Each structure stands twice: as structure tokens, then as C-alpha cells.
Image (spheres, rainbow, N blue to C red):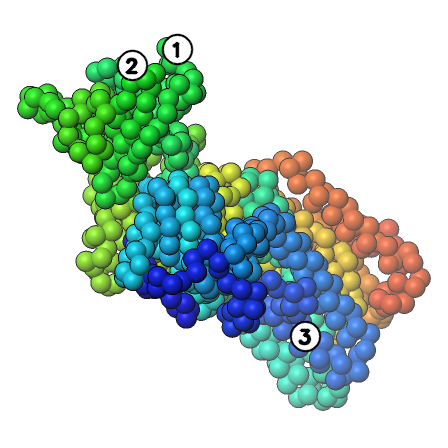
Amino acid sequence: MTMETPGQEAPGNTAPAPGHQRLAGLTAAEVLERRQRYGENQLPEEKRVSAWTILINQFKSPLVYIILAAALVSLIAREYSDFAIIMAVVVIDAILGSVQEYQAERTYTALKGLLKPAATVIRDGVRSEVPVSELVPDDLIVLTAGEKVPADGLLLEATKVAVEEAILTGESEPVAKAALPDQAAATEAHRVFMGTTVLTGRGLMTVTGTGTHTELGKIASSLHEHVEDETPLQVRLEAFSRTLTRIVAVFTLAILAVGLRMGHGFLEMLRTSIILAVAAVPEGLLIAVTVILVVGMRKILKRNGLVKKLLAVETLGSVTVICTDKTGTLTEGRMRVTRTELEDSQRALETMVLCNNLEGPLELALWEYASAQPELKPQELVDRSTRVAEELFSSETKFMTAHTVLDGQANDYLKGAPEIVLGMCDLSDQRRVEILGQVDQWAGEGLRLLGLAYREHRNLDIHTGYHWLALVAMEDPLREGVVDAVRVAQHAGIQVKMITGDYRRTADRIGRMIGLVRDGDLVLEGADLAAMDDAELARQVPHTAVFARIKPQDKLRIVRALQSSNEITAMIGDGVNDAPALKRANIGVVVGTATDVARESADLILLDSNFRTVVAAVEEGRTIFENIRKVVAYTLSNSFAEVITIFTAMILGWPTPLTVAQILWIHLICDGPSDIVLGFEPKEEGIMDEKPKSIQEPILTRLSASLIGFISIASAVFALTLFRHFWAVHGDAVEGRSIVFASFAINSMIYIFAYRSLRRSMLHTAPLSQNKALILAVIGGLITALLPFSVPALQRLLGIVPLTVDEWALVGGCAVSLLAAVEVAKIISLRIHHQA
């Protein structure tokens, strides 16, 4: 690991002069002066979005702009009641969306740890506990085993100090540290870093960097420089709104031009244009999309995934590549001894117990294995022994020795990499070759290997004279269901790539076990990536299934390479150094035990740290997008039918068949609830049999566009026929508007059942019992369609008159006929689509 020298003005590179008062520490005045100069020892957090900001952001939707334009025209035309109704729609949707998003933000905040860590500091010659946030450069900090290092610093004193730096490097092996000699230049061995963990020993450090001037702080600060890309849903909604805006503009200008040419007054035509614009915009779609996303968040939460951002729910459904860590996500994250070849069982078990600090998964696995043996009780063995000295394991030496006295007998116990331990043992050449052959065989199966040895005590600096005891093999078992989850993802057209710090052979074996590595797939190592430029990496990434010996900082390059090929990428990580890659990915995913910095950068938190949860979230995301498509098609069918009716009536010189109040009543009161609950439809069969949708693919498919066209024209024909009959024959435009209003309100409540699936006939969709809310919404919609005809005040507001039983029968017959025609049209369209 190579770290930069901390950037604060502290004596960071050399040991203090002999006269330095090591044990006195800073005075109160010096602490105050440094705190004013450097600030608090805190990492930069992503600024929490205020409730007001969340509310204002709700008005930035492309669909809102269209509705606000219609409201503005209403205001100019002095149609104040219409203006008030339209603005009420926008405000209600904004409040609903902001409340749900604010609740999601609070849920995430509640899950964060609220602990306020403290550090042992020496100031004015007195040792005391102070909050970590109050530390300043030059403070003297006492470090003991099990503590987090509270800031970057240099060790002035060190007794058997070993530190785990996985939070920065991704490597879980202990790193031995030493005190910095007087006037010597500092090296990696003398530095400790904020956020790392002291595994063994004790030490005294002087702080050289706090807050953003630590290695941890530099990484956290860099995250704020990234500008997030738009989500697939935002891209699609913007494209949809642009198309809808053009359609509305064309129809509105056409109405205005034709009307003026026919001799109608400007204000009259402006009012008609407002009616058409309001009819064209599906006001209920705003609320429906928001609620669908919120319901999606809750469904994913039930499957152990916490989505932090509302729009990320749908983005999950567009994912084309999942980059996942191995340990703890694909595997259980807990080592187990699976094979042993013991030459001296008793001594081997002694070594497992007595050459063990119970630090890290490997040593815990040895302890658990020894505990399971009937002839041994590890704790009793420890109680009967005394450790005199030890040489800690490091990534450089790859072994650990312990000088221990057991029952009066002094022995040296040794464990480490098999090839290293073999080199320290007295063995015949033949036996050495046999053991190395066993090592190669087990290593080829991806097992993690450990050699054990012992001798009667000598100087620990003499690394010879040991007796070989055992070869131990361990593995991190695959999580239950992960193989099936990977298979489901691949079947859905999603590439799954494993990124791990493990050795190539181990990573390759795990990749083949879970079905990631297939014939022709590449396995690249960190060294391979270092030798490639970005262009070459972008060419190799699509063909690479496993990345081994990868450092956390390499993940950002991999994400960028994938995105350069227009892949929608989900990145799973947990460490601080994963945060830039998580931030850059389209969907950043972290496990439940991830660091705060990583969680701040993520869009999805796996509460169970399981890869299956990612696949489940993708499945929910696809279902959400399909349901949004259904709702968009359904609402546009209603809107365009009204537009065609109004436009045709204008061309024919008829009175306007609908008023603004009637349109908004249909859109919001009658259809509003059904717009929303149509988005509650359960997952359809085959949704994970399809390839991911391209970000360029529009919201409306050819089938849904065909249905919109058919329903709009058919519904408009019914409405115009009814209007002409009651207006021309009875000479009453109000009665004509009344039956057109009833027809549109009832029609949409009937043909909504055809929109439950855009993949199959209504007769072959899921039982209605799986979406009981839809039944209630349809019943409510029918009631609100009938209610205005019975309440005089609503009759006056909407400009309608009561209908006779025969007229209601005519409306109902048209609605049922329309549903039957829609189903026939859908079956024909599906057959044409499948043949194509």
C-alpha cells in the first residue's frame, strides 16, 4: 500500500526532536488554536437534502412543465377555476412525492450508526477521553488493540502493533507497525491511518492529519466532484414529454388556426385550445408514477434491499451488468476448515490454538475447527499456557510464530503459507515434493492453504529447525441460492462480473462454481489492468468474467470501461475505497456492514448482504418499468380519445363536447385512483426471460402505441356519435356533453382490464385477486362517474344534466363493446409482434 503524506502542517515526515515532550501533549491553548485552524476531525458527509429542496425538486419533472403551461394559458384567459384545479393537481402530486422521498431519506438516516466514538488523548500531561471529532494535529493518542485509529498519524511508541488496513486497501491481512526512531524519515511501517483497526499491541501516535486531510478524507472529498448522470427513467420521461409537447403544440396551434380561419373569436379559440391542452396531458400520470416508485421501494425493502433514491427503483430494472465482490456477497464471508492432512494431530491442534490471536476469518476458522475436536478444549489449553513472545503475520513474511510455554515446556509454534513454512522445516526432499504436490492440487481447487509446524524453543529470529505438522485447507462457502441467482441474472441478459482481491486460481474456481466463467471468458488480474490503457480495458471488459487481485481503486476504471460501452452498471462494494466506483456506477450497491462513506455513495443497501437481493431488486425494477408503461399507455388512451373528439368537433363546427372541469374530473377523480393501482400489478411471467431494455428504448412500445391509437379512435367515434345524436336530434349541447362525459368516464373503467397485461390476453393474465386494489379503484371510479348526475351542485360545476336509464344502458353497451374490440385488437397485435 502506498499512501501520500498527510497534507496538514504537522511534523509528518520525521520523528520529533529529542526534546519533544512526548508524554505532555498539547496545552489547552494549542488545542484551541489548531482547532480554529484545521476545523473538526470529521469526514465530509453528503449534505442531507432538506424537506424544502425535496419539495422543489418535485416540480422539475418534464410532465409538470406541460401541465404548468396549460395552467398559465388558463390564467391568461381568465379561466381562474380551471387554473385553480390544474395547480391543485400539481401541488398534490408534489406533496405526495416529497413526503415519500423524505420518508425514504429518514429511513436511511435511522439505519446509520449514531455512535459518537472517543479517543484516549494526552493533553497537558493528563490522559483523558475526548470525542474523535475534537482531535487536532500534534495531539498524542494512545492506541490499544481493538480500537479504530481516529486520525492519520505517526507512531512514537509501538509494542507489537499490528493494524488491519482493509478499509483502505481491501487486504484483510494484519500489517505490522513500528515506532519511528528519532530524526528518522517516516515510512509506511511507521504510519497509521484513520479508520483502520488496531489488531494487536499498544502504541502512542502523534496526529499528522485530521478530517479531510486524512487518506480517508481525501477519498470522501473526491466523491463530491462527480456529477450524476440522468437515470434511464428520466431519459425516457424527457423523451416522452418532448414528443407529447410537440403533439399538444401541433393540435393546439391547429385548433387555433382553423378556428380563426372559420371566423371564431380569438378568446373563444384560446379557451378551446386550453381545453384541448388539458385533455392531452395525463395529469394523473404524475401521481401514478410517484406512487408506483414508492410502492416499488417498499417491495424491495421487503426483499431486504433499502433503496435510498426514488428514481433508482426503476434504474434497477435497466441494469445490464452487475459487478460484485466475492467475500460476504457471493460467499458467506466466513472461512471454514474443509480439509486437513495431519502428521501429528495433537501438536497440529496445539498450533491452531496457541499460534492464534483470534483476529480475522482465518484464525477464527482454526479455532472453530479445534473446538469441534472431542479430544481438545481450546480455552483450557490457552489457560494452561503462557505466551512469551511472538512474530506477527505480515503480507511480506507470510507467517506467524509464537513462543509459548505449555505445562512447563517451551515450544515455538508456526503457521503460514505452506511454501514458506516448508522452507523453515527439516524434511527429506521426497517428503517436501509430496507436500508441494498436495499444495498444488488443493490450490488448484481454489482452497486457501495453511501450513503448521513446531519446534522446541529457540531464538524466534532463527527460521529453521521446525517439524512439519499439517496442511490445512479452508474455503469461504457459497451463500445459499447464489448459483440460482446468478443463473437467473444471466438468463435475463445481465452480465455478472466478479471483482475480488483473491488469488487468480481461487477466483477462477469460485467463478466456475457459480457459473460466471464460461468457455472463452477471460480472467484478468490487477497487474493486467495496470498494463492496459483505458481504450484497451474497454475492449477487454466485455469478455472478462472475473477480475482477481484487484485493488479497490481499480473498480472505478472497470465501471468507466463498462459505461463507455453504454452498459447500465450496478457495482457492489463495502469499503471506503469502493466509494468512487459506487458513486460512478448507475446503481451503487453496498452490503449492510459497509462503511459510512460507502453507504453515502450508494443507491441500494443490501440489508442481508446477499447477491440474491440484487437480482430480486432488478426483478422488481423491471416489474415497475412494465407497470409504468401500462399506466402511461392507459392514461394516454383516455387523453388522446378526448383530444380527437374535441379536435374533430371543432373541425366540424360543433360545440365543444367536453369542458375543462369535466376533463379534470375524469382524469383525476374517476381515473386517478385506477391510474395508480394499475401500477400495483404483480410480476408477469417471463419478465426475467427478456434482455434488459436499452436506455434509448421509448416508454411506449409498438403494441401499446397501437392500442392507444385503436382505443382513442374507437372511443372518439362512440363519443362523437353520441354527442351528435343528442345535440343535433335533441338540440341540446348540454345533454350531448353529459352523455360524452359519462361515456369517457365509464369507458376507461371498463377497458382498464385490457391494460393489466401488454403481453397477453385479458383472459390469461394473473387473477384479479392479486390486485384487489384495482377492483376497489374501478368500483370507486364507477361511483364517481355516477355521483355528479345525482348531486345538483356537481351538475352545475360540471355543466351536466341527469341521464335516463336507456341512456345509461347505451353508455354501458358502448363501454363493453369497446373492451371486446380492444381485446381483439390486442390479440391481433400480439400475433403480428410474435411473427415479427
Which residue matches tag 1?
A: 374
CA neighbours of label 3 inside 10 A, class few (<14), some (14 to 19), many (20+): some
Does residue 259 appear to the left or right of 40 in the view shown? right
Which residue matches tag 3?
A: 68
Compared with residue 157, is residue 221 higher up or lower down, i.e. above or below? below
Element class at badge 3: helix
Can I make out residue 751 in this image?
no
Residue 348, quarter of the rendered image: top left
Residue 378, quarter of the rendered image: top left
From the viewer's perspective, is the residue at label 3 or at label 1 nearer?
1
Does residue 405 appear to the left or right of 66 in the view shown? left
Nearest to N terminus: mark 3 or mark 2 = 3
Q: CA distance from mark 2 to mark 1?
A: 12 Å
Residue 596 lies, in percent from the top left, at 51, 52
Does residue 750 appear to the left or right of 596 in the view shown? right
Element class at badge 2: helix
CA neighbours of label 1 inside 10 A, class few (<14), some (14 to 19), many (20+): few
Which residue matches tag 2?
A: 346
For the point 35% across and 41% down, which residue is it? 160
Q: Amino acid at mark 3?
A: Leu
Can I make out residue 764 in this image?
yes
From the viewer's perspective, is the residue at label 3 or at label 2 nearer?
2
Q: Residue furthest left?
A: 429
Element class at badge 1: loop
Q: CA distance from mark 3 to mark 2?
A: 81 Å
For the point 32% across and 45% down, which residue is it? 175
Compared with residue 783, is residue 64 higher up or lower down, i.e. above or below? below
Does residue 684 appear to the left or right of 662 in the view shown? left
Count of numbered marks: 3
